[in-house]
Amino acid sequence: HGPVSKRYLPFFSSLRGLADTRLPNLPYTRKGQLVPPALRPILRAAAVRRMAKILVCIFLAAAVCTAGNFKLYLKDGSDQLVREYQVQGDRIRYYSIERSQWEEVPLELVDLDRTVRERKRLDDEAQKLAAEDRVERDAERQGRVELQRVPLEDGVYWVNGEQAVPLKQSETIRKGNKRRSVLKALSPVPVVSGKATIELAGTQSQFAVNSATPQFYLRLDKAVRFGIARLTLHKDSRIVENLTIVPIVKQEVGEQNEVEVFRQQLAPSVYKIWPVEPLQPGEYAVVQFTQDQDQVNLRVWDFAYRKP
């Protein structure tokens, strides 16, 4: 505000070049452990963000020196930037920031209600921003800790305390509907849509979790759609997805019983997911969905939730 904000204009100008700051490689952690080359770009990006926050904190520290400064509003619409004021009878004594001295003004000329109201509003905003910044710093710190737990190999990992337990990628089976094939053969025009399923062999997963809200790390080779799906039992197999094959164009449309999940990105192509609502006991899978031209392709990591 006013002359105070102009004082820090050179500081804001210096922040513009922050994104171009070149940092050396970070081959070691604080504990002297060697950082794998694949993690170094991620850590360098985190270091750049950290430097930006440090500079912002420097500015905030400088602003703290003027945090007690506020506007003393007058009834004619003008204001004075002051450090403090005192009501002394029918006069107000205040310390002027502009002139660096104590001054007085008749109380009847001061809009004291507006002064108190605006000062409280600014204090509330400052406290809210400080709380949000604290939450963001805590989340980033936790994210960095979790990122170090995720193995470098692509895959899905169950979060078991501080350990990341790998899930084995499942082999899928594509099955077509024979009755639909007969109908299409009898029809002179291909207007009958085809049906197929993507299934897993067996009725039970060999990997079981003991929590209704399991958390998983995902390290994927590329950013694609992914989530958790509940599997449907069918005879001696589990259906991951039902496919509808559009006639003529032969395009596949997939439909699955997808579970609503929270998603948190820890780094490029590294995510953490967990269900919004507790899971019901049953068979599930973490699924990566990809579309190869007109065909649906899935990568599946199955698991089961069974009550302890």
Image (cartoon, rainbow, N blue to C red):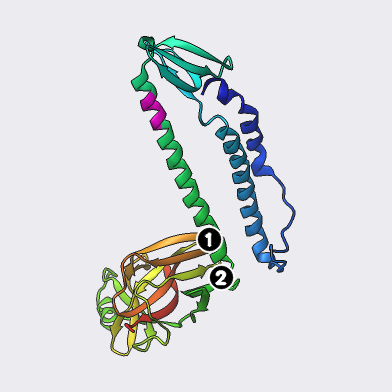
Q: Nearer the viewer, residue 136 or 169?
A: 136
In the image, is residue 117 part of the stretch drawn in magenta?
A: yes
- Kindly identify the amino acid type of the residue bearing the numbered disc 2: Val
- For disc 2, the marked residue is 150
Q: Nearer the viewer, residue 118 or 88?
A: 88
Residue at the spot x=64%, y=49% of the render?
Answer: 48
Q: Nearer the viewer, residue 137 or 80?
A: 80
Earlier residue among tags 1 and 2: 1
Magenta-colored segment: predominant secondary structure:
helix
Residue 170 appears in which quarter of the rendering?
Answer: bottom left
**Residue 182 shows in the view:** yes
Residue at the spot x=60%, y=49% of the render?
Answer: 49
Q: Is residue 169 above or below residue 108?
A: below
* Location of residue 72 in the rendering, given as x and y in whole percent from the top left corner: 44, 19
User: What mark, if any, has residue 143 been given in the picture?
Assistant: 1
The C terminus, quarter of image = bottom left
* Location of residue 264 in the rendering, given as x and y in whole percent from the top left corner: 46, 60
**Magenta stretch?**
116-121
* Location of residue 75 in the rendering, given as x and y in whole percent from the top left corner: 37, 12
Q: Residue furthest front?
A: 89
Q: Is residue 106 above or below residue 61?
A: above
Q: Secondary structure at mark 1?
A: helix
Residue 25 appears in which quarter of the rendering?
Answer: bottom right
Residue at the spot x=59%, y=38% of the render?
Answer: 61
Q: Which mark is nearer the camera, 1 or 2?
A: 1
- Kindly identify the amino acid type of the residue bearing the numbered disc 1: Gly
Q: Nearer the viewer, residue 237 or 251?
A: 237
